[in-house]
Image: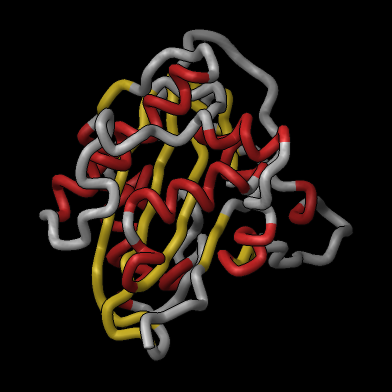
């Protein structure tokens, strides 16, 4: 999901304008469906080049690695994709890291895989950690979960890259990214890996607010 503000005015999604019934157009993209998209093709080949090899981003398939190591691997994967696309690397921001981790924790704590987990607004944690009060900002959020090998860094990142909405955020006009991983029970899956990416940038002038877009990926394939 993307949102932006000029001053203190928050952009409002199209589905929240006056006279339009509020909807919940959360884009749930099953990894099973995404797998069908991985068939050899020119488009798939172009997307595969955005996914870093293990020699460059280590720990991307290491589920036994520490959470910090896995988060760093996800950051490495994100920056590699941007480099391959001719974009600058994301800067690190402690506030965005905190907000991303808090969002992943919310998803598990409230057992709710949603941008509005625990009934909070999508930008609740970014505001709470102090990232959004700047005069001008833009931000976006990716969330995903998987279990077993479906929840490792490489699997989640590949799902994001093959999803247009997520890829647009990863390759979007943001200067910083925060990454949060939480592990716990989600639905009937005891060991779900829940991932959040919080993208952001502060600017010195007003910019048009992008259309709000949800970006969520869920893996329904628990290890049996």
User: Could you say which quadrant of the image residue 189 lies in?
Assistant: bottom left
Is residue 24 something that shows in the picture? yes
Numbered disc total: 0
> Where does residue 20 sit, x and y in percent of width and height?
86, 59
- State the residue lying farthest toward the right: 19
Instruction: Please state if 91 lies on the left or on the right of 144 as rendered.
Output: left
The answer to whether residue 135 of the structure is visible from this angle is: no
| Residue drawn at 61 percent across, 46 percent down | 162
- Between 108 and 36, the one nearer to me in the picture: 36
Percent from the top left, x then y, of residue 110? 36, 78
**In the picture shown, does residue 37 fall above or below 192?**
above
Which residue extends farthest left?
Answer: 66
Nearer-the-camera pick, 148 or 133:
148
Q: Is residue 9 left or right of residue 128?
A: right
Residue at point 27%, 43% (across, down): 129
Is residue 19 shown above or below 190? above
Using the image as rendered, state which of residue 106 and residue 130 is in the foreground.
106
Colour scheme employed for the rendering of this structure: secondary structure
Quarter holding residue 27: bottom right
Q: Position of residue 82 (x, y in %)?
A: 47, 22
């Amino acid at each position: 999901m993307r949102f932006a503000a000029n001053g203190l005015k928050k952009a409002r999604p199209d589905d929240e304008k006056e006279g339009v019934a509020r909807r919940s157009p959360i884009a749930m993209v099953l990894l099973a469906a995404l797998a069908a998209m991985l068939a050899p093709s020119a488009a798939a080949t172009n997307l595969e080049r955005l996914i870093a090899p293990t020699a460059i981003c280590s720990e991307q398939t290491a589920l036994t690695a520490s959470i910090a190591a896995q988060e760093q691997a996800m950051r490495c994967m994100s920056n590699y994709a941007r480099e391959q696309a001719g974009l600058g690397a994301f800067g690190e921001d402690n506030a965005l890291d905190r907000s991303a981790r808090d969002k992943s924790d919310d998803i598990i704590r409230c057992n709710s895989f949603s941008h509005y987990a625990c009934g909070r607004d999508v930008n609740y944690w970014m505001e709470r950690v102090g990232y959004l009060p700047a005069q001008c900002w833009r931000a976006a959020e990716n969330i995903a979960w998987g279990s077993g090998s479906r929840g490792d860094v490489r699997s989640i990142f590949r799902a994001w890259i093959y999803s247009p909405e997520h890829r647009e955020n990863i390759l979007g006009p943001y200067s910083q990214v925060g990454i949060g991983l939480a592990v716990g029970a989600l639905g009937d899956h005891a060991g779900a890996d829940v991932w959040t990416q919080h993208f952001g940038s502060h600017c010195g002038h007003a910019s048009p607010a992008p259309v709000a877009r949800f970006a969520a990926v869920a893996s329904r394939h628990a290890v049996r």
